[in-house]
Image (cartoon, rainbow, N blue to C red):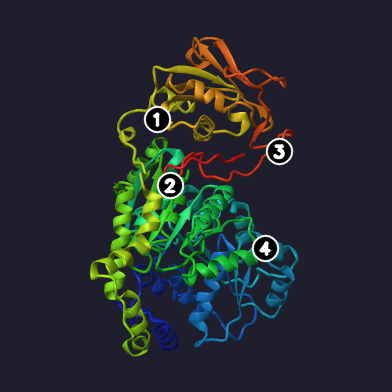
Amino acid sequence: MKSFNELGLSGQVVEAIRQMGFENPTPIQEQAIPVLLQGNTDLVGLAQTGTGKTAAFGLPLIELIDEKNRTTQALILAPTRELSVQITNDLENFSKAVKDLNIVTVYGGASISDQIRKVKKGAQIIVATPGRLIDLIERKVVSLGTIKYVVLDEADEMLNMGFKEAIDEILSGTPDDKNVWLFSATMPREVREISKNYMNNPQEITMGERNQGNENIDHQYIVVDERDKYMALKRIVDYSTDIFGVIFCRTKIDTQRVAESLMKDGYNADALHGDLTQMQRDRVMKSFKNKTLQLLVATDVAARGIDVTAITHVIHMNMPDEMEYYTHRSGRTARAGKKGISLAIVSKKDLGKISQIEKTLKRRFTKIMIPTGDEVCQKKIMELTHKMRNVEVNEEEIDSFLPEVYHELMDLSKEDIIKRFASIEFNRFLAYYRDARDLNKSDRARTIPSDDRDRDGSGGSYPSTTGDRVFINVGRMDGLEVGDLLGLICDYGDIDKTKIGKIDLKGAFSFIELEKDVTEKVFKGFEGVEVRGRKVRLEMTTGRSDRDGGGAPERKRSYGSGGGSRERSSGGGEKRGKSYGGSSSGEKKDRSSWGGGSRSEGGERERKKRW
């Protein structure tokens, strides 16, 4: 491996790098820096996130920029404001002892007048998100005529986010003799088109096989029911020693919901997504980088620019639809040569995505088992024991306090002291995980094709029974998914989910199968219940559902309330409105529990409004 001295960098730059604690270049830096220092070539650099791409283009750029010329000589385009700020910070650190460079960051969500003022002072390097840069170009604040170097960082992600037209507009307005340096983790067709349209015989540097993931990442997965994902997440977090991770969700709503649930349950977590203000995003990122925040729950877009080397876990609450997103997600861990874990929490319907990613990455995922409640408790008590054994004792300062401690504990034996000490941590977890059920599911769907129920999306992930088939007048149009309806039945029927068979979720209604000994109990439990302002009605049925090829089912007897009139339940009595998730106007309410589950893991039932 070469040293920075051997790459052609000036002594001042090398010394600045050394003072920052860097001794040797990464592979992408070793390959790219000598090429870019020539200042007359285009380059495509393919490398995973966390491999040092910022220094690979940033160090040569600092050497090539004329500090006496106050015109804008370089543009660096990045997909998000977080990544833009991170790049600027790195460049300022690289150059502060070398050159007097004015590096300005411009991005949306911040005061444009402040950014205009900074650019007009003479920005030699502008680090920008494409949208805000277009705005400044149209305001004639930024001139592209003096540009010598354009860097496209995370090019694949910029295209995934819909910036193709903006990138085309920016590149087409720059001089023909500029150099374009393109860095990307993957090379989809759109990125290749940019290379063909705007680059002149670029040199290509590829670290590892194309689309191959970071070798230091251990790719794992667990299989659970959709409704159990949050409980599985908590067990993984509880079992993992000193976890410091990013949890990815597909939507902003899910991101906020998971973060709020974690915080409510006592975890040190927070959310990062596009609905936050810039001040809120900065606060969250500062806490995470300072490690005062243990778990960051983020969307794919918001997590770009997270450059924290000590992340131990990346956890996928939802598998992304695009391979590139998985690559970027997992690249948050195992940075700067460290090892890390990328863990996917999947239901059976997502197992196909695991297989597809395995083929693309040429890496096998390892199926791990979700720890049982007993295993979590055992792990926690041993962690506490190890901390006690290895704690550093300040003999001088603690000695004066010990006599009172000895006096307080003098009537306890050594065994009693150990038991009480261990119980400080053990009791909390034991209370939560007492009688906790096994969350693991088989992954046979990886090799055995899904049945028709799974393919048609009707749910059907629960075992069929030979019990009663029941019609219920709520379905997808009421905002319910299979897990939500399961939770409703468990909550208001006051039954265990093992008593429930197949759930066939439709638009305005659904069918559920119940063991015969709980049917009457479920019907009584739904007396007066409303969903989204609509009174719930249950009916016994015979015949087949419309999916089975028959017409509407024959209804045998009716319970519940409906039609706006009072009816008599089988147990007698008049039913009045227990409201479930919405006013009579149908206004949607936020869910207050995750995934439709009806039990805490300790077995205590809770009746919660979800909608």
Foreground label between 2 and 1: 1
Q: Residue at x 56, y 59 (%)?
A: 79
Q: Which image quarter: residue 12?
A: bottom left
Answer with mark 3 or mark 4, whichever residue precedes in sequence.
4
Q: Secondary structure at mark 1?
A: helix
Q: CA distance from mark 2 to mark 1?
A: 18 Å
Of residues 241 and 361, the one nearer the viewer is 241
Q: Residues within 10 Å of mark 2 (few under 14, many from 20)?
A: some
Q: Residue at x 30, y 46 (%)?
A: 369
Q: Identity of the amino acid at label 1? A: Thr
Q: CA distance from mark 1 to mark 3?
A: 32 Å
Look at the numbered discs 4 and 2 and tell me whether their residues touch, using CB distance below 8 Å. Answer: no
Q: Which labelled disc corresponds to residue 284?
A: none
Compared to residue 317, the image places residue 116 above or below, namely: below
Q: Identity of the amino acid at label 2? A: Met
Circle 3 is placed at which residue position? 587
Q: Which labelled disc corresponds to residue 498?
A: 1
Of residues 377 and 140, the one nearer the viewer is 377
Q: Which labelled disc corresponds to residue 109?
A: 4
Q: CA distance from mark 4 to mark 2?
A: 35 Å
Foreground label between 1 and 3: 1
Q: CA distance from mark 4 to mark 1?
A: 49 Å
Answer with mark 4 or mark 2, whichever residue precedes in sequence.
4
Circle 2 is placed at which residue position? 231
7 left or right of 262 in image: left
Of residues 358 and 461, the one nearer the viewer is 461
Answer with mark 1 or mark 3, whichever residue precedes in sequence.
1
89 left or right of 131 in image: left
Q: Which image quarter: residue 106?
A: bottom right
